[in-house]
Structure formats: C-alpha cells, structure tokens
Image (spheres, rainbow, N blue to C red):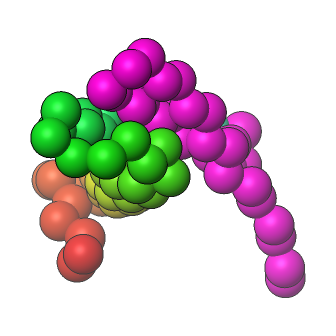
Amino acid sequence: MIETSEIEITFTEDGDHTEARASLLLRGATFTGWGRARRNPADPDVPMVGEELAAARALSELAHALVEGAAQLISDREVGPARPET
C-alpha cells in the first residue's frame, strides 16, 4: 500500500518576525504545528533565514503532534497509556 500526504506550510511575516503554520491531513485527521523566528536587529535582513527557522520549528511541533496522536490511538485500544518510541 502506498499513501501520499502533503504538508502545507503557511508563512506570515511582519518586519522582524516570521511565523509558520504547518498542517497535515492524514486519514481524516488534521495535525498542525506552529513556529516563529525573530530577526536580531543587528543581523542583515535575509527573509529566507526566518522562513527556514520558523518552518523547522513548525515541522518539529507537527512531528510531536503526530507522535501524540499515535499514542492516543494506541491508548484507546490498549489498557493504560502508550509511550511510543521517538
């Protein structure tokens, strides 16, 4: 079986801050992650850096949400809380 899902990342920028929201629809469940980057005023204005950092943080949070979702599904079917390996 092969299943393909896409992660959508939306960026919002306002001067020295970049925010990213990553979302994934997987078998009917939506998982999201959020990340933020702040440019030090002494650093050069390079928007790609802020986008990369914000996206990485959003994807990290998304990964944690997926692990939590899997743990919840396991717990719902088992006796006691699940602790999946990460």
Q: Main secondary structure of the magenta part?
A: strand
Between 60 and 41, the one nearer to me in the picture: 41
Locate residue 72, reporting x and y percent: 34, 47
In the image, farthest residue toward the bottom: 1
- Answer whether residue 64 is visible to the viewer in this image: yes
Locate residue 6, reporting x and y percent: 74, 55
* 47 w.r.t. 2: above or below: above
Is residue 86 toward the left or the right of residue 53 in the image? left
Count of residue discs: 0
Is residue 20 toward the left or the right of residue 43 in the image? right
Residue at the (22%, 78%) spot, across then down: 85
Query: In which quadrant of the rendered image does the C terminus lie?
Result: bottom left
Residue 38 figure quarter: top left
Q: In the image, is residue 3 part of the stretch drawn in magenta?
A: yes
Residue at the (31%, 47%) spot, across then down: 44
Where are the magenta residues, as a range? Answer: 1-28
- Answer whether residue 66 is visible to the viewer in this image: no
Locate residue 15, reporting x and y percent: 39, 20
In the image, farthest residue toward the top: 14
Locate residue 1, reporting x and y percent: 84, 82
Residue at the (16%, 53%) spot, across then down: 81
Residue at the (76%, 59%) spot, across then down: 5
Between 18 and 73, the one nearer to me in the picture: 18
Between 80 and 29, the one nearer to me in the picture: 29
Q: In the image, is residue 14 part of the stretch drawn in magenta?
A: yes
